[in-house]
Amino acid sequence: MLYTLPELLAVLIVTCGIALQTVVGIGYGLVAAPLLYLIDPVYVPGPILLVGLGLALMMVIRERRELRWKRVMPAIIARVPGAWCGAALLVAIPQYALSLFFGFSVLSAVLLSLWRLSIPTTPINLTIAGFMSGVTGTATSVGGPPIALVYQQQDRITARSEIAAFLLIGTPVSIIMLIHQGSLDWHTAHLSLKILPGLFLGFFLARLIDGKLTTTSAKPLLLAVSGASALMVTVKGVIGWLGL
């Protein structure tokens, strides 16, 4: 399988995002989605979600002894109507509006991450977070931040294992909704195969940096890259809106 320079760059981006999420529990969609969108909007949301499903499966297998499925279940159930809304939104708005929504969603996630909210991990909060994750995760492939906010008070191992469990069940729901709405086809599946090596490279890289990289040390870089790329996506949407 031959790669162009943009495709190699896409694999590198996916590798870094996968490594971050494997270590700290979040980072793949937040970092990779806006950067890949700038390379080619077709990467969002289909290919990123398909590769993210593979990551969630690998993490759940690795962290299965730490999982508490009962606690995360309200978020999983709420993901279903959220995913339906996200898929409907994706086909209802033009490309420039999607860029604006995408950029705004990522910027909002960055700002919320900077704002140290004290949100308890309760069934009600998990339900709200699950629904919001379904909307943003399906429309933009950035569904981690809403659920991560509810897990801020949990330790790193618990957070990353239960977020992975949520994504393992929730991501296929989003994929099914996208297929139903006609937003995922063979071309997006081909792009997914192109960036798939980044999944295994990132998972291997995570084993090398786990213990050396923590949520606290990774957060400034993660948010800086995500914020800058989200601003560029937003500018792209404004340019499309103005017809320039």
Image (cartoon, rainbow, N blue to C red):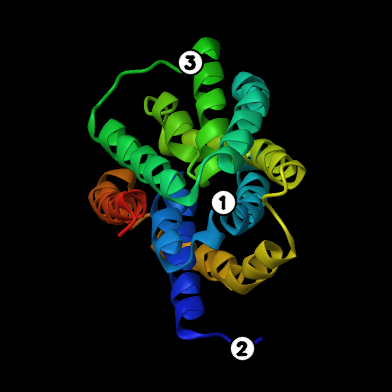
> Residues under labels 2 and 1: Cα distance?
23 Å
Q: In this view, does 204 lie above or below 131?
A: below
Residue at the disc numbered 1:
45
| CA neighbours of label 1 inside 10 A, class few (<14), some (14 to 19), many (20+) | many
Residue at the disc numbered 3:
125
Residue at the image point whose x is 65% and y is 24% from the top? 81
Q: Which residue lies furthest to the bottom in this view?
A: 2
Q: Nearer the viewer, mark 2 or mark 3?
A: 2
Q: Nearer the viewer, residue 175 or 186?
A: 186
Is 225 placed left or right of 102 in the picture? left
> Residues under labels 2 and 3: Cα distance?
46 Å
**Residue 99, x across and y down, in percent:** 41, 49
**Residue 149, x across and y down, in percent:** 39, 28
Question: Residue 110, labelled with which disc?
Answer: none
Is 3 placed left or right of 1 in the picture? left
Residue at the image point whose x is 30% and y is 50% from the top? 242
